Image (cartoon, rainbow, N blue to C red):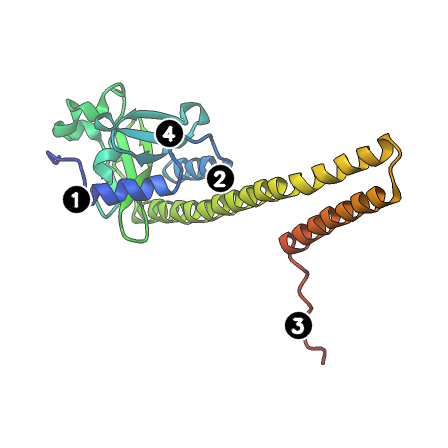
Amino acid sequence: MPVDIIPEDESFRIEELNRFEILNTLPETDFDLLTLLAAEIFDSEKAFICFVDKDEVFIKASFPAEYGPRATKRAENLCSLSILKDEVTVYHDIHQHYELTDSSFLKGDDDLRFYAAAPIKNGSGSALGTICVTDSKAHPDVSEKQIRLLQLLADHIMEKMESRLVNLQLQKTHDEFLRRLSHDLKNPVTSISLYAQLLGSREMSAEKVFSMASKIEISSQKIQTLLSTAIPKPQPDTCVQS
């Protein structure tokens, strides 16, 4: 067991983890289903998707679902050790690893016997977290296929995080677009409403009526301009008919 559980790329790793905006988020079905699949592959009691932050390990998803999302101390979670390795970590029987049995990593989980975890790595190779499976009974026989499938699940989680981030950015862009459009439309709409109220409230000279009608027309054109530039025009069909 390493004395120092902090990876060499810790600063960059934490920066990358924060970029994905996954910490302290609500449950998401896609992640929950992957923990179910991991538990099925190993026939294990529990499975988790964890992300290792500076001081805590955030459990994003779990099987059974009643165990997450939540956070545990980094020094009390085996995933803190698993992210130090490039390959899948497997403890067939933790009772045989005396360096762990009395360590803080098993605090509050005395019945833990089996643990396997695959690192969730970004494109630069930094481990942001793990998908792991645990059991209260030892698993002396873990196949290469099971290990390979667990790593494939970890790779799939990374892909989902990438697509999730793109969707988040698109949503932010969309929300900002609506906010700006609402702000830009506010003045011309208010002007039209005000001029319409004035026109209907009292008699005016033809000159004033013409002036207000002109201002209403200008505000209307501004609204049309805003909408025409905000909403993209449909692109013509580029398919060539044979």
Which quarter shows the N terminus? top left
| Residue 123 visible | yes
Q: For marks 2 and 1, give the CA distance.
A: 31 Å
Which of the two residues, 97 or 209, is positioned nearer the viewer here?
A: 209
Query: Which of the 4 quarters of the picture holds residue 134?
Result: top left
Which quarter of the figure is the C terminus placed in? bottom right
Q: What is the secondary structure assignment of the residue under circle 1? A: loop
The residue located at (44%, 23%) in the rendering is 66
Disc 1: CA contacts within 10 A as few (<14), some (14-19) or many (>=20): few
Q: Determine the residue positioned at 52% across, 47% down.
A: 170
Location of mark 1 (residue): 8
Cβ–Cβ under 8 Å for marks 2 and 1 = no
Residue at the disc numbered 4: 46
Residue corresponding to mark 3 = 238
The amino acid type found where label 2 is placed reads Asp
Can I make out residue 136 in this image? Answer: no
Gap between marks 4 and 1 measured at Cα? 30 Å
Residue 79 horizontal/vertical position (percent): 26, 34
Q: CA distance from mark 1 to mark 3?
A: 52 Å
